[in-house]
Amino acid sequence: MTESGTTQLLEGKKSAAAIRDDAAATVQRLRAAGVVPSLALVLATSDESAAWYTRAIVRAGEKVGIDVRVERLADDASAATVRTALQRLSADDTVHGIILQVPLPPGVDMVEAAAAIAPGKDVDGANPVSLGRLIAGLPAFAPATAAAVLRILDDNAIELAGRRAVVVGRSLVVGKPAAMLLLARDATVTIGHSRTRDLAARTSEADILVAAVGRPRMLGAEHVAPGAVVVDVGTTPDENGNLVGDVDAEAVMGRAGALTPVPGGVGPVTTALLLHNTVAAAERAAG
């Protein structure tokens, strides 16, 4: 708590700006050496939220000097078609980063498809090889949203070692990798999910609570310990079309010690880290 009954908002804008500035400086050096960092987004959906996210990455990439290309596949593309596109981009020396956008067409499994992304270009940590290296503590690109959780905590000088952390959500995109990243920083980690019995009893013990279950306003005041740091990864449109998180922000204000807003918290940092990872991949490829 900053003061009794107050909740600090952990905005992501400052962190995102610092990441983008660092990426832009590296891009400038690479371009001077004749290397143009390039990011490819594979899109096989007409989902509007995916289209919005894609446009946001394209705009952000242009601002820092990254060449962002969108590979559009049919909404009913087969698993073989998706894998072929990813394999082709993986073999293209002018492409440094690859992102497979979700949702995917029916019958296309994300894990199986992402296995076709070369690990060195897997800037969103989707390939099972990347995830395995993350768990083993070996160098790899972590899923950007999970990494964004840690970046926000670090940039706000929130101590992790020895703290009790509860991650609500078990996806390969956020929940599991976020838990592994927290564990690697010596937090004591529990993973909860939508079927955890008496979830509030588990989450209310947490010093740090990461909400990544994908259910709008699922976590209320009873889930949050007084003074806890709450990182809300959720982004779901409500009945009015506004983005809301997995945490009922109004209910926990004044109880949580700190809270990431939705929107404006984890999201901007995630996008910035994707650009950062692409630049890092380009720098590595350039030798």
Image (cartoon, helix red, strand yellow):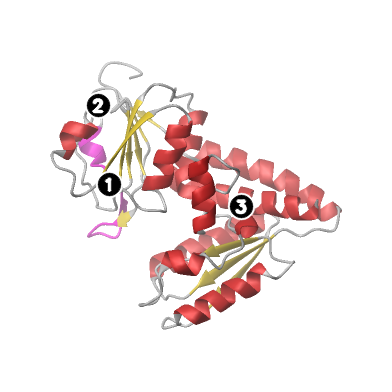
Mark 1 vs mark 3: which is more N-terminal?
Answer: 1
Label 3: state its secondary structure: helix
In the image, residue 4 above or below residue 173: above
In the image, residue 147 above or below residue 182: below
* Image mark for residue 256: none
Q: Amino acid at mark 1?
A: Asp
Q: Quadrant of residue 222?
A: top left
- Can you identify the residue that label 2 sits on? 254
| Whole-number angstrom distance, CA of label 1 to CA of label 3 | 26 Å
- Position of the N terminus, as image quadrant, is top left
In the image, residue 104 above or below residue 258: below
Seen at 17% across and 35% down, the residue is 200
Rate crowding at label 2 as few (under 14), some (14 to 19) or many (20 or more) other CA atoms within 10 Å.
Answer: some
* Image mark for residue 275: 3
- Can you identify the residue that label 1 sits on? 246
Locate residue 234, reporting x and y percent.
33, 49
The answer to whether any part of residue 287 appears in the image is yes
Is residue 53 within the magenta segment? no
Q: Nearer the viewer, mark 2 or mark 3?
A: 3
Seen at 14% across and 42% down, the residue is 197
Is residue 88 found left or right of 223 in the rendered image? right
Tell whether label 2 touches label 1 (CB within 8 Å): no
Residue segment shown in magenta: 237-252
Mark 1 vs mark 2: which is more N-terminal?
Answer: 1
Of residue 201 and residue 45, the one placed in the foreground of this image is 201
Mark 2 vs mark 3: which is more N-terminal?
Answer: 2
Rate crowding at label 3 as few (under 14), some (14 to 19) or many (20 or more) other CA atoms within 10 Å.
Answer: many
Q: List the single residue furthest toward the right.
A: 33
Locate residue 25, reporting x and y percent.
74, 44
Locate residue 238, reporting x and y percent.
25, 57
Q: Amino acid at mark 2?
A: Gly
